[in-house]
Image: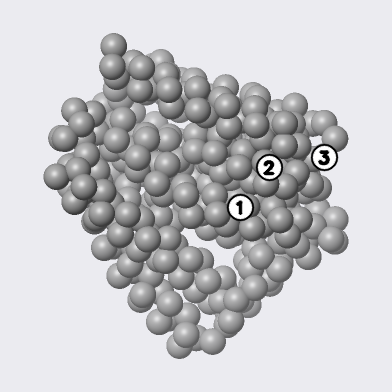
C-alpha cells in the first residue's frame, strides 16, 4: 500500500511542478501582453510564483474535508522554504543580497507569523480573523510593489529578467489550460496519496501535510533555487522564499478561515508557528550583515530544519 501511494505521490509532485511552471510563464506572458512592464510582472511573480503548487494542494485538501492537512502544508511549506530551499541554495553558492525590498518581505513574514499566532491562541481561527489575514496580505503585497520600485537599476533589471516569457496570447491561453489540468490532477494525486500515507503510518493529517506533502512540493523549488544561486540571482532566491512564505501564512490560511472557521491542533500554536518565528528571527542577522548569505549560514538553516523535522518525529514516537 505504501509503495503504491509513494508512486502516485511522486507522479502528483511531478504534475504539480509542471503545472506551477506553466502557470507562472502564462501569468507573466499575459501580464506583459496587456501592458504590465517586465519589472512589475517580476515583482508579482516574486510573491506568488512558488506558491502555486501549495495553493492547488490546499484547495484540494479543503474540498475533500482535510483542513488539517492543508494547515500543515501551509506552515510546513513555509518552514521548508526557510530551512531547506534557502539553505540548500546558499550551500550551493553564497547568495548576494542587494534588494532592499527583501527586508520589507522579511518584516511581513515576521508580522504575519505573530498575527497568526495571536489569533490561534484560543485554539481556532474565525472568519473575521481570516478576513484580517487577507487584508494584511493585501497591505503586504502593496508594500512589496512600492518598495520594489525604489530598487537600484541593476536589481530592477534582474527582477525583470526573471519574468521573461513569450507574450503570444494563444500560447499563454494553452499554457493556462495545461496548468489547470496538471495542477488539478497533481493535487488530487498528492492529497489522495497523503491520506494513504497517514493511514498506513498512523500519522495525523497535520503531520502528513507538514512533512511529506510540504517537503515534497518544495523539492522543485529547491532545484530552481540552486540554479538561480549559481547564476548569481541571490535576490530572486530569497525573494521567492519570503514571498511564498507570506502567501502561505496570510493568503492561504486567511482564505481557508474565511471559507470555514478552523480548529487548530494544539501543536500548531505550541510548536509549528513558534518554529516559523524562530526561523524568521535566525534569518534577521543574515539580512542585516554583509549583504550576502554564506555557506555557513545556509548550513545553520539546514541544521535547524533537520532538528525541527527530528523533533516532530520524536514527538510522534513518544
Gap between marks 1 and 2, in whole Å?
A: 9 Å
* Residue in the picture at 29% in, 35% down: 208
Gap between marks 3 and 2, in whole Å?
A: 13 Å
Please state, as top left, top right, bottom left or bottom right, where the N terminus lies in the image: top left
* Residue in the picture at 63% in, 52% down: 226
Residue 291 got which mark?
3
Nearer the observer: mark 3 or 1; the answer is: 1
Please provide percent x and percent y for residue 7. 25, 54
Q: Is residue 96 above or below residue 176?
A: above
Q: Secondary structure at mark 1?
A: helix
Nearest to N terminus: mark 3 or mark 1: 1
The quarter of the picture where residue 261 lies is top left
The quarter of the picture where residue 233 lies is bottom right
Local crowd size for mark 2, using a 10 Å CA cut-off: few (<14), some (14–19), many (≥20) = many
Nearest to N terminus: mark 1 or mark 2: 2
Q: Is residue 199 above or below residue 188?
A: above
Give the labeled residue for mark 2: 90
* Residue in the picture at 81% in, 54% down: 151
Answer with left or right where residue 48 lies relative to residue 198: right
Local crowd size for mark 3, using a 10 Å CA cut-off: few (<14), some (14–19), many (≥20) = few
Q: Is residue 246 visible?
A: no
* Residue in the picture at 56% in, 71% down: 28
Please provide percent x and percent y for residue 298. 66, 35
Gap between marks 3 and 1, in whole Å?
A: 18 Å
Please provide percent x and percent y for residue 304. 56, 25
Q: Secondary structure at mark 2?
A: helix
Viewer-nearest residue: 128 or 290: 290
Nearest to N terminus: mark 3 or mark 2: 2
Give the labeled residue for mark 1: 225
Q: Is residue 29 visible?
A: yes
Amino acid at each position: 500500500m505504501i509503495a503504491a501511494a509513494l508512486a502516485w505521490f511522486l507522479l502528483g509532485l511531478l504534475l504539480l511542478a509542471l503545472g506551477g511552471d506553466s502557470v507562472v510563464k502564462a501569468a507573466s506572458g499575459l501580464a506583459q501582453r496587456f501592458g504590465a512592464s517586465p519589472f512589475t510582472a517580476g515583482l508579482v511573480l516574486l510573491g506568488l510564483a512558488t506558491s502555486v503548487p501549495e495553493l492547488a494542494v490546499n484547495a484540494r485538501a479543503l474540498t475533500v474535508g482535510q483542513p488539517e492537512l492543508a494547515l500543515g502544508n501551509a506552515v510546513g511549506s513555509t518552514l521548508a522554504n526557510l530551512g531547506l530551499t534557502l539553505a540548500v541554495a546558499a550551500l550551493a553558492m553564497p547568495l548576494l543580497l542587494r534588494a532592499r525590498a527583501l527586508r520589507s518581505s522579511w518584516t511581513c513574514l515576521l508580522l504575519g507569523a505573530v498575527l497568526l499566532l495571536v489569533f490561534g491562541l484560543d485554539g481556532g481561527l474565525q472568519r473575521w480573523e481570516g478576513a484580517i489575514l487577507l487584508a494584511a496580505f493585501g497591505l503586504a503585497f502593496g508594500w512589496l510593489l512600492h518598495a520594489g520600485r525604489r530598487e537600484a537599476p541593476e536589481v530592477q533589471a534582474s527582477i525583470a529578467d526573471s519574468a521573461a516569457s513569450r507574450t503570444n496570447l494563444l500560447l499563454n491561453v494553452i499554457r493556462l489550460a495545461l496548468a489547470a489540468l496538471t495542477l488539478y490532477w497533481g493535487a488530487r494525486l498528492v492529497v489522495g496519496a497523503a491520506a494513504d500515507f497517514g493511514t498506513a503510518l498512523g500519522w495525523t493529517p497535520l503531520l502528513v501535510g507538514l512533512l511529506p506533502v510540504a517537503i515534497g512540493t518544495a523539492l522543485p523549488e529547491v532545484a530552481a533555487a540552486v540554479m538561480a544561486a549559481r547564476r548569481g540571482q541571490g535576490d530572486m532566491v530569497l525573494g521567492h522564499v519570503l514571498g511564498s512564505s507570506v502567501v502561505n501564512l496570510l493568503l492561504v490560511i486567511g482564505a481557508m478561515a474565511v471559507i470555514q472557521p478552523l480548529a487548530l491542533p494544539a501543536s500548531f500554536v505550541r510548536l509549528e508557528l513558534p518554529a516559523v518565528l524562530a526561523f524568521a528571527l535566525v534569518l534577521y542577522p543574515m539580512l542585516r550583515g554583509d549583504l550576502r548569505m554564506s555557506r555557513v549560514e545556509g548550513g545553520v538553516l539546514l541544521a535547524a530544519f533537520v532538528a525541527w523535522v527530528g523533533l516532530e518525529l520524536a514527538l510522534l514516537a513518544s
